Structure formats: structure tokens, C-alpha cells
């Protein structure tokens, strides 16, 4: 495991949250060539999508359940920040809003989904 932190402001991940995760997993396998593997979420599985050449994880296709239940059905970009609380405060001060409370991603860090004043959605991710 690489212990180096990603550069602040860089994009670290993309997730698609949808009520059609099972169907769209196959869609993206066929359309872009990704391969999928199941990721247990307890009572259901989300999907980690990998590059067929490098076998590296590149994105996720997730069910709109649990922590994701209130997210809009769209691709969500995760951007690394140095301090998620400070970034949320700056978002709110500039007319945006946090769409959900800060969530912990065990062993990796914490994140929050925000919406900018125009309505675009982004996840802020602070690495451990």
C-alpha cells in the first residue's frame, strides 16, 4: 500500500450512484470496456470498475441506498482537500451547501458531498 497522500486538488475517484447499479455495471462494461468486481455493502453489492489493461480500479457503480440514498443519479467526482471541514465552511460561505454530513471511509479518510451555487455536485475527500 502506498502511504503517500495524493496532491490537494487532484481527482481521486469517480462514482456513479443510481437505482440501476446492476444494469449500469453491465452497460459500462460493454460501452467503455471496464471490468467489474463486487464490493459488499452488507445486504447488497456495489461494483468496483477496473481497467481491463492495468486491472487498476478506476471508478465505482453504486446503488442509491444507505449513505448514497439521497445522492442524485450522476457521476460523482471525489477531489482531495487538506481539511474537509474548512472546505465545507468555504463552500457554504460562497453560496454552496453540504448535501450530507461528513462520512468516514474506514482506513482511507473522510468525505462530504457538496453542491455549488449553480447546482453542480462534488465530493470533498480528506485522506488520513
Image (spheres, grey):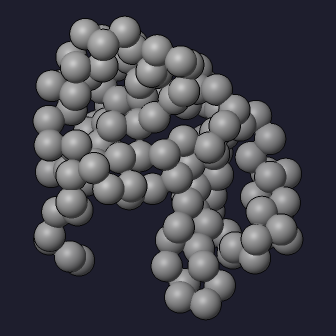
Where in the figure is residue 105, as x and y percent of width and height? 32, 44
For the point 75% across and 76% down, the residue is 33
Using the rendered image of the protein, determine whether residue 2 is visible from the camera's viewpoint.
Answer: yes
On the rendered image, what quadrant is the N terminus found in? bottom left
Note whether 12 is above or below 37 in the view shown.
above
Using the rendered image of the protein, determine whether residue 66 is visible from the camera's viewpoint.
Answer: no
For the point 41% across and 36% down, the residue is 123
For the point 45% across and 21% down, the residue is 116
Where in the figure is residue 87, as x and y percent of width and height? 22, 28
Note whether 71 is above or below 39 in the view shown.
above
Q: Residue furthest bottom?
A: 53
Where in the figure is residue 26, as x and y percent of width and height? 82, 62
Nearest the viewer among 76 and 62 is 76
Where in the figure is residue 82, as x and y percent of width and height? 14, 43
Quadrant in the picture for residue 113: top left
| 75 left or right, relative to 7 | right
For the point 49% across and 79% down, the residue is 56
Note whether 3 is above or below 109 in the view shown.
below
Amino acid at each position: 500500500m502506498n502511504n503517500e497522500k495524493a496532491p490537494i486538488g487532484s481527482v481521486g475517484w469517480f462514482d456513479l450512484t443510481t437505482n440501476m447499479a446492476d444494469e449500469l455495471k453491465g452497460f459500462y462494461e460493454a460501452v467503455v470496456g471496464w471490468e467489474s468486481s463486487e464490493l459488499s455493502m452488507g445486504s447488497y453489492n456495489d461494483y468496483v470498475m477496473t481497467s481491463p489493461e492495468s486491472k487498476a480500479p478506476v471508478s465505482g457503480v453504486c446503488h442509491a441506498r444507505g449513505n448514497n440514498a439521497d445522492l442524485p443519479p450522476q457521476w460523482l467526482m471525489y477531489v482531495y482537500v487538506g481539511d474537509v471541514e474548512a472546505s465545507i465552511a468555504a463552500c457554504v460561505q460562497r453560496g454552496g451547501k453540504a448535501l450530507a454530513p461528513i462520512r468516514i471511509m474506514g482506513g482511507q479518510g473522510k468525505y462530504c458531498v457538496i453542491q455549488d451555487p449553480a447546482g453542480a455536485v462534488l465530493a470533498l475527500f480528506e485522506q488520513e
